[in-house]
Amino acid sequence: MTTDSGTESTGSTIVRGMRSTVGRESTTFGFSILATVTFGVCQVTQGSPDLPRIFLYAAGAVMSFTLLEGILSAGFRRPMPQHPTQTLALGTSLNILSVLVGLGAATLLSAFFSHLAVWALAPFVAGVSYLLTESLEAALAERVLVSAGDPEAQEVSD
């Protein structure tokens, strides 16, 4: 159904709410799944963690985002652009790939090394792998939408 302005009407506040929430939270949802399963991998390969290892794990997981945000925002001085929601929706619908790539990277690291540092490095490597793969997914989504004739797919907001 279309309104006079040419925009699609969702017909329901619940549907609009779901679309907004799912579209906004897809990356976060995928990363939280990755963080959870990476912790499980570390526990299986490294043993049950003590409190310092849990803190190392949390720091490693957070640092993947912190490092990339710092680099991509030129030292936190430039805004982080966002694709239009249709590009984000298509790109994040492929989250299974980014989660599995991140999990695979953490599994390899954790399986071949046994050291206190693994508790920080495994979630860090998982997070960076996840974010790089998700970036490739967004680039693929952009190309698919552009080739399908969507002129807004390449636009980003600052």
Image: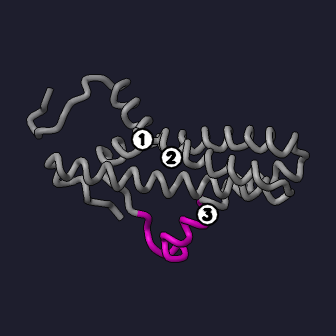
Q: Amino acid at mark 2?
A: Ser
Which residue carries the number 3 mark?
A: 66
Decide: few, some or many residues near mark 2? Use Cα within 10 Å; few <14, some 14-19, many ≥20: many
Residue at position x 55%, y 47% in the image: 101
Which of the 4 image quarters holds residue 136?
A: bottom left
Q: Residue 94 — which label?
A: 1
Q: Earlier in the sequence, mark 3 or mark 2?
A: 3
Which residue carries the number 2 mark?
A: 98
Q: Which residues are magenta?
A: 65-80
Marks 2 and 1 in Cβ contact (< 8 Å) = yes
Residue at position x 49%, y 58% in the image: 132
Question: From this viewpoint, which residue is outermost toward the front?
Answer: 112
Distance, label 1 to label 3, CA atoms, is: 23 Å
Q: Amino acid at mark 3?
A: Thr
Which of the 4 image quarters holds residue 78?
A: bottom left
Residue 67 visible: yes
